[in-house]
Image (cartoon, grey):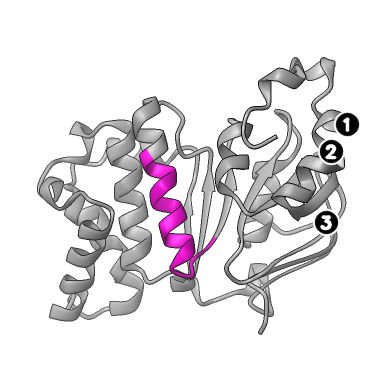
Amino acid sequence: MTPPITVENVSFAYDEQPVLNNISMTVEDGDFLGLIGPNGSGKTTLLQLMLGLKKPDSGRIELYGTRADKYKQGTRLAYVAQQSTEADTMMPVTVREVVRMGRYAHAGLMPLSETDGRLVDEALETVGISDLADRKISRLSGGQKQRTYIARALASEADLLALDEPTVGVDADSVEAFYDLLGELNEDGMTIVLIEHDIGVVIDHANMMACLDGKLYEHCETQQFLESGALERVFNSTHGLAPGQLGGRA
């Protein structure tokens, strides 16, 4: 089976300032990958490269066997960016209208069908926000907004879900429920790539970890990662992280 993401010897720079150096890794079908690293380590850049939103300066990235920046099957991908909450809040749309956006790529120029409507309803029910379907997204809490974006991904029938710090500004109880939902989606077969600043939360939920700081320090199963010493090598005292702050299963 062709893996969802293959990264081969990828480097990238902004205005000749190196950000990523010779990164190679593969995200396998069904992985729940936690992508961690200090601020400025290149996590968001790598994620955008993986999704074909940026083009590497050297090396190659493939999505399902096709060069990422040439990949055309956008319905298989869903991306929740850091700016999604603010951008969608500014739109005078309801929760249902946001989730319906996930069907537009399937419908093309045709009106949405009854099948499209059923998939939207099922997505709303799966993430537990059917009762919010007619509420303006600007009136939702942070956790409810993120569930809306996940429902949009489900409605699009995406195979790969990428999230960049999706719980910023979300209260603690909603964060736990949100990650429980991601875990259920992963168990159902969705591949997930997650950037999250709370390392303990990532360790508790992801089955694969990748630790990045310009270069890739480690990419392996979570338990093996905890035993590798990569956290200590990357998150040293210059990044203000003491060993007791790691949390999770360590």
Residue at 72% of width from left, 59% of height from top?
55
Residue under label 3: 57
Closer to us: 191 or 63: 191
Residue at 61% of width from left, 61% of height from top?
51
Evaluate if marks 3 and 2 touch, with contact meaning CB atoms under 8 Å apart.
no
The 10 Å Cα crowd at callout 2, few under 14, some 14 to 19, many 20 or more, is some
- Write down the region rendered in magenta: 177-191
Q: Secondary structure at mark 2?
A: helix
Give amino acid for label 1.
Arg
Image location (x, y in percent) of residue 153: 38, 61
Asked if residue 190 is among those painted magenta in the image, a careful observer would answer yes
Q: Is residue 75 left or right of residue 244?
A: left
Give amino acid for label 2.
Ala
Give amino acid for label 3.
Asp
Asked if residue 210 is among those painted magenta in the image, a careful observer would answer no
Residue under label 2: 230
Image location (x, y in percent) of residue 13: 82, 44
Closer to us: 111 or 129: 129
In primary-sequence order, the first of circles 3 and 2 is 3
Closer to us: 32 or 195: 32
Q: Secondary structure at mark 1?
A: helix
Image location (x, y in percent) of residue 196: 58, 37
Q: Is residue 241 left or right of residue 53?
A: right
